[in-house]
Amino acid sequence: MKSILVLNGPNLNLLGKRQPEIYGHATLDDVADLCRAAAGDVTIRMEQSNHEGQLIDWIHEARTAHAGIVINAGAYTHTSVAIFDALNAFDGPVIEVHISNVHKRESFRHHSYISPRADGVIVGFGINGYAAAVRQICDLINAN
């Protein structure tokens, strides 16, 4: 099972249009292309939802379908115990990604419910953080 699930939370469907001064001009399609290029022979499944339950369902499916998860949960990062619990039921590596440096933003963005489960956290490197996360998971799953 050499595949990685790349999950994107609310408002990331507007990437490239919403607050480009914070998130840049790249689109979610650009992120998908970057992830696929970084993955080599590992398959990437890219998903985005504005709905918490859908993200949780995809995490549950990942338990039997994917070797690792890259997740940018968007605002759910700071609010969702349910996503944290779902990730705890997943045995593979999890890398949390944020396009902006959340620690330089509003104080409510400084806490993550995802980080205690994540094997690594990448913040503030724009969409390049996704590629770094994919490469790290590839290294981890290829080592096993």
Image: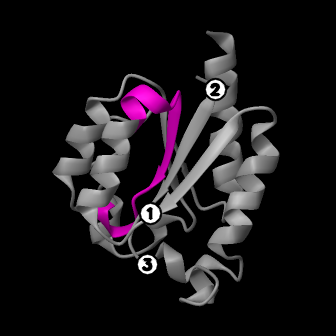
Q: Quadrant of residue 139?
A: top right
Tell me the magenta residue range: 62-76
The residue singled out by tag 2 in the image is 2
Residue drawn 37% across the image and 29% down it: 63
* Residue 72, magenta (yes or no): yes
Mark 3 belongs to which amino acid? Asn
The residue singled out by tag 3 in the image is 11
Mark 1 belongs to which amino acid? His
Q: Quadrant of residue 25?
A: bottom right
What's the distance in space between the residues labelled 3 and 1, CA to CA?
A: 19 Å
The residue singled out by tag 1 in the image is 103
What's the distance in space between the residues labelled 1 and 2, CA to CA?
A: 33 Å
Q: Position of residue 123 (x, y in %)?
A: 55, 56
Mark 2 belongs to which amino acid? Lys
Q: Position of residue 23 (x, y in %)?
A: 60, 77
Front one among 100 and 25: 25
